[in-house]
Amino acid sequence: MNGKVGFDYELTKKTIIGGIVSAYKNNFWGDLRNSAAIAIDNKLDTAIDIIASRRDIWKNISTNLNIAHTFSKFRKLSVNLDYIYYTNNNPSDYRYKFIDGRGAFIYEQQAKTNKITPITFWVQSADYSTMLSKKVSMESGIKSTFSILTNNVVFNNSPVYIKQKNLRMTSSLTLKLPKEYVLDISGFYQTRFLFSLIYKAEPLGAVNFGVQKKLKDNKSKVIFNMTDIFKTQIQTYSVNFPQQNVVSWGDLFNSQPLFKFTFTRTFGNDKLKDKRNRTTAEEERARVQ
């Protein structure tokens, strides 16, 4: 079940203001079956049959306010403000059946979990484009995302309360140069955050660089990209819940510096007019959904 409504209003000939409100409710459920085995000296000691019954209930409301102003033919500014609120209810029942190496039943264990997660995003962005000279144009953008996530998890009557607030900032700069060259520089910085519900991750960021050349047929491009060029996208994590027997720490290498060449060619009608950008929160929705 979902719905969306929006509007655009022309304040002046050069300024347009708009807004969007959307909401949905989704309900998923199902049974999952897994198995595990414990071997000693390469001989099966214990087999474990795991059956999980899960429900996943999502509710969402999102709003967007945007304004676009044209200073002149080659100078434009657009600003977006998004508010996104989710709630996720995720009750689960687990049944563990233990069987010895000869196939005889040992015992059965049951566990229940219930996780309620409210998630809030505030997303602000601004994009500006202008001509630096007759042959050089510039497009720049900045975006910040402030999020609040709260987890109330119950595992076999043992409550675990988790709350996090974090900020993510991204920025990009595009220069359109003579002879159909384009340079792109982008990067992001992420403050301390949680992943997989309970792991605390330290701040991290990355810088990317790219250059592209449009060929003479105007439908083909050659692109060269370098990602994480300073090798800073290293995620240091830790979790410390001794009462639940969950204590761990380590480093995760989310990516390695990557060098990539790409050739693209456009077929068909390439003169379709782009729609006006009315929201910049697609990345935040993708992180939740």
Image (cartoon, rainbow, N blue to C red):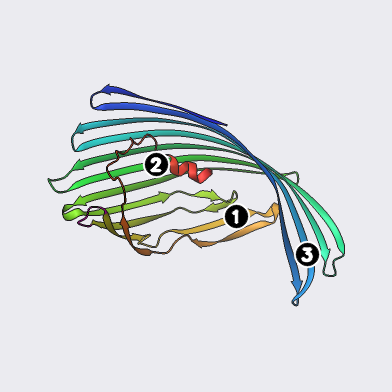
Single out the mark in the foreground, 3 or 1: 3
Picture quarter with the N terminus: top right
Q: Is 278 drawn above or below residue 12 in the view shown?
A: below
Q: Position of residue 247 (x, y in %)?
A: 64, 58
Other-residue count near label 2 (Cα within 10 Å), few / some / many at <14 / 14–19 / ≥20: some
Q: Position of residue 197 (x, y in %)?
A: 59, 48
Judging by the rendered image, the residue that carries numbered circle 1 is 239
Q: Earlier in the sequence, mark 3 or mark 1?
A: 3
Q: Report helix, strand or loop for mark 1.
A: strand
Judging by the rendered image, the residue that carries numbered circle 3 is 47
- What's drawn in magenta, residue-wise? 215-219
Q: Is 279 drawn above or below residue 32 in the view shown?
A: above
Type of residue at label 1? Answer: Val
Picture quarter with the C terminus: top right
Residue at the image position 31 percent from the left and 39 percent from the top = 274
Spatial separation of the CA atoms under disc 3 and disc 2: 49 Å
